[in-house]
Image: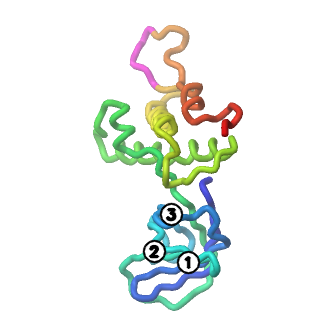
């Protein structure tokens, strides 16, 4: 999971929400984050406006009434933004036909972003979640998210409309995706 942090304290003054975290390592101003397990006024997706490394706090702005400071037990996850719904739809060559299709593409994009980030982290890379490291990684992440969408309703690989499929139908593109992400090989400095 891309940088999971514990939220231990919350405060809101004049629409500026301040969260005290377990640590602020690997967080950057402008990162998109998801907060959960605190209160409704703090939970949700936000963009970091400032970081205080001394106090281990971050801030984001959102229109809410002031709140008294409170100790909480919540979580903050940095959201990976290496591909998006539009890129996946472009690759698929379709527009989402229904609200359910749109929602499922969004889920595939989030899963693809998270998977690609985690695989690169496991391979020894130190990437920023908000900034795609290269065009190849962007393409690999997009391919993976699109592959997840195309596997909808299939047993082990993306669905095919070919009733006479040879050797079990199309195979996944995982080898190409791993190559584009630069994983399953030695890291090159």
Q: Who is closer to the viewer here, 115 or 179? A: 179
Disc 1 crowd, CA 10 A, few/some/many (<14, 14-19, 20+): many
Q: Is residue 185 visible?
A: yes
Residue 6, position as x, y percentages in the image = 64, 70
Residue 152: say if magenta: no
Q: Is residue 30 left or right of residue 76?
A: left
Calculate the distance from the C-alpha at mark 2 to the C-alpha at mark 3: 10 Å
Which residue is located at x 49 percent, y 74 percent? 50
In the image, residue 40 sits, relative to residue 27, either above or below, namely below
Label 3 secondary element? strand
Q: Which residue is mark 1?
A: 19
In the image, residue 58 sits, relative to residue 156, either above or below, namely below
List the single residue furthest toward the front.
189
Q: Is residue 148 visible?
A: no
Label 2 secondary element? strand
Q: Which residue is mark 3?
A: 33
Residue 182, position as x, y percentages in the image = 61, 34
Calculate the distance from the C-alpha at mark 1 to the C-alpha at mark 3: 12 Å
- Tell me, for residue 40, which label it has, or none: none
Q: Earlier in the sequence, mark 1 or mark 3?
A: 1
Which residue is located at x 55 percent, y 78 percent? 19
How many numbered markers are drawn? 3
Report if the CB atoms under discs 2 and 3 are less than 8 Å apart: yes
Q: Is residue 163 left or right of residue 20?
A: left
Report if the CB atoms under discs 1 and 2 are less than 8 Å apart: yes
Q: Which residue is mark 2?
A: 60
Q: Which residues are magenta?
A: 159-164
In the image, residue 23 sits, relative to residue 144, either above or below, namely below
Image quadrant assignment for residue 185: top right
């Amino acid at each position: 999971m891309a940088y999971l942090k514990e939220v231990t304290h919350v405060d809101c003054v004049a629409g500026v929400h301040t969260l005290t975290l377990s640590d602020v390592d690997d967080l950057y101003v402008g990162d998109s984050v998801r907060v959960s397990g605190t209160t409704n006024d703090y939970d949700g997706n936000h963009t970091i406006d400032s970081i205080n490394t001394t106090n281990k706090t971050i801030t984001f702005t959102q229109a809410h009434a002031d709140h008294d400071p409170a100790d909480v037990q919540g979580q903050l996850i940095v959201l990976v933004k290496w591909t998006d719904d539009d890129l996946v739809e472009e690759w698929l060559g379709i527009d989402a036909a229904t609200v359910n299709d749109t929602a499922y593409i969004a889920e595939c994009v989030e899963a693809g972003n998270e998977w690609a980030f985690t695989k690169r982290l496991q391979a020894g890379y130190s990437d920023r979640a908000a900034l795609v490291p290269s065009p190849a990684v962007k393409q690999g992440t997009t391919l993976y998210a699109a592959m997840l969408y195309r596997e909808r309703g299939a047993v082990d690989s993306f669905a095919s409309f070919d009733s006479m499929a040879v050797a079990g139908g199309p195979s996944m593109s995982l080898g190409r995706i791993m190559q584009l992400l630069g994983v399953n090989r030695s890291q090159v400095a």
